């Protein structure tokens, strides 16, 4: 019965995405423009470095990593913070709390259709194109199913962080500044904008044990076959830890904070 509810929300999300096809088109165009900027930026960085390899990565390695990171960001980003903020400010939150489903689960599954469509429209084609253009850069083997497992955990980690930040809106009633700070921290420390390999050694070690690198750097490391055996198990184990910890924390924080809700809208 519960699965039927989830599938209904998934179907509704897919239908909504199909109805607003132009938004997908604009997203793809925006992503292409971003990649053009990234290409010229890093080309200039490598040209000024005077060497073909920086921090163990060639220009091709860096570009492939960032192209996939950009596509993965488009797939994993849910914008739950904005949705929670709007629900609180408009008063819609009261109606959502009356629904026969936990709000955290309802919010996630209401976005599930969009996530599936973004995966099919952005990340999967990007991965296929990178594979065709670069040859063996993306190995075709055990890394693919392990990558899918890693992505699912990355999605849960990212959503939990968003939900925790969104819950703060119950106290502040304004989320813009806090969300901007969260996005900067996540994008910087996750490897989405700068590969973690480019961080100073001390910072790189510290970042590895933070949850942010488990969102983008960890799945991409597995997909590109940069780690094998015990190292992959360590990556997955760390992701699993953050999934459980942040998932539990987000639920506990919400349960405690929702008692403070103040509705301003109608």
Image (spheres, helix red, strand yellow):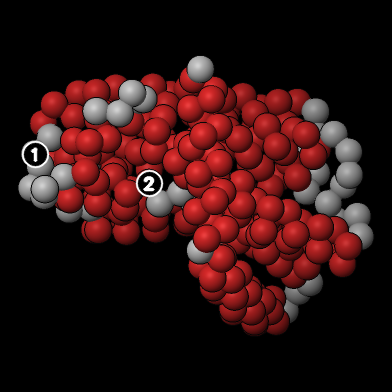
Find the residue positioned furthest to the top: 1
Instruction: Kindly identify which residue carries mark 2.
Output: 80
Eyeballing the image, is 142 above or below 37? above
- Residue 102 in the image: x percent, y percent? 34, 25
Report whether 174 appears left or right of 18.
Answer: left
Q: Residue at x 51, y 17 (%)?
A: 1
**Label 2 SS:** helix
Mark 2–mark 1 Cα distance, whole angstroms, equals 19 Å
**Label 1 SS:** loop
Find the residue positioned furthest to the right: 135
Q: Which mark is residue 196?
A: none
Instruction: Kindly identify which residue carries mark 1.
Output: 262
Q: Nearer the viewer, residue 91 or 82?
A: 91
- Residue 23 in the image: x percent, y percent? 51, 67
Q: 10 Å neighbourhood of mark 2: few (<14), some, or many (≥20)?
A: many
Report whether 173 appears left or right of 150.
Answer: left
Query: Can residue 36 be seen?
Result: yes
Q: Residue at x 81, y 63 (%)?
A: 129
- Residue 133 in the image: x percent, y percent? 87, 67
Q: Residue at x 39, y 38 (%)?
A: 107
- Sequence-wise first label, 2 or 1: 2
């Amino acid at each position: 019965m519960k699965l039927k509810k989830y599938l209904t929300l998934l179907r509704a999300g897919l239908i909504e995405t199909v109805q607003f096809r132009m938004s997908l088109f604009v997203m793809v165009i925006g992503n292409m423009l971003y990649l053009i900027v990234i290409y010229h930026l890093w080309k200039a960085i490598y040209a000024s470095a005077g060497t073909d390899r920086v921090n163990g990565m060639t220009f091709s390695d860096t570009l492939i990593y960032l192209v996939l990171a950009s596509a993965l960001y488009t797939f994993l980003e849910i914008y739950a913070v904005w949705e929670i903020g709007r629900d609180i400010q408009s008063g819609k939150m009261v109606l959502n709390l009356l629904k026969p489903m936990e709000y955290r689960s309802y919010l996630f599954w209401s976005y599930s259709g969009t996530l599936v469509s973004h995966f099919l429209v952005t990340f999967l084609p990007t991965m296929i194109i990178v594979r065709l253009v670069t040859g063996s850069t993306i190995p075709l083997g055990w890394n693919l199913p392990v990558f899918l497992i890693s992505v699912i955990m990355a999605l849960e980690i990212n959503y939990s962080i968003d939900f925790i930040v969104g819950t703060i809106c119950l106290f502040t009633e304004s989320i813009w500044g806090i969300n901007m700070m969260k996005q900067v921290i996540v994008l910087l420390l996750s490897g989405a904008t700068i590969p973690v390999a480019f961080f100073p050694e001390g910072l790189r070690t510290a970042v590895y044990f933070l949850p942010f690198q488990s969102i983008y750097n960890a799945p991409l490391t597995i997909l590109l076959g940069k780690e094998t055996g015990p190292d992959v198990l360590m990556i997955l184990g760390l992701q699993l830890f953050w999934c459980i910890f942040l998932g539990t924390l987000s639920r506990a924080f919400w349960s405690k904070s929702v008692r403070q809700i103040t509705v301003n809208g109608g």
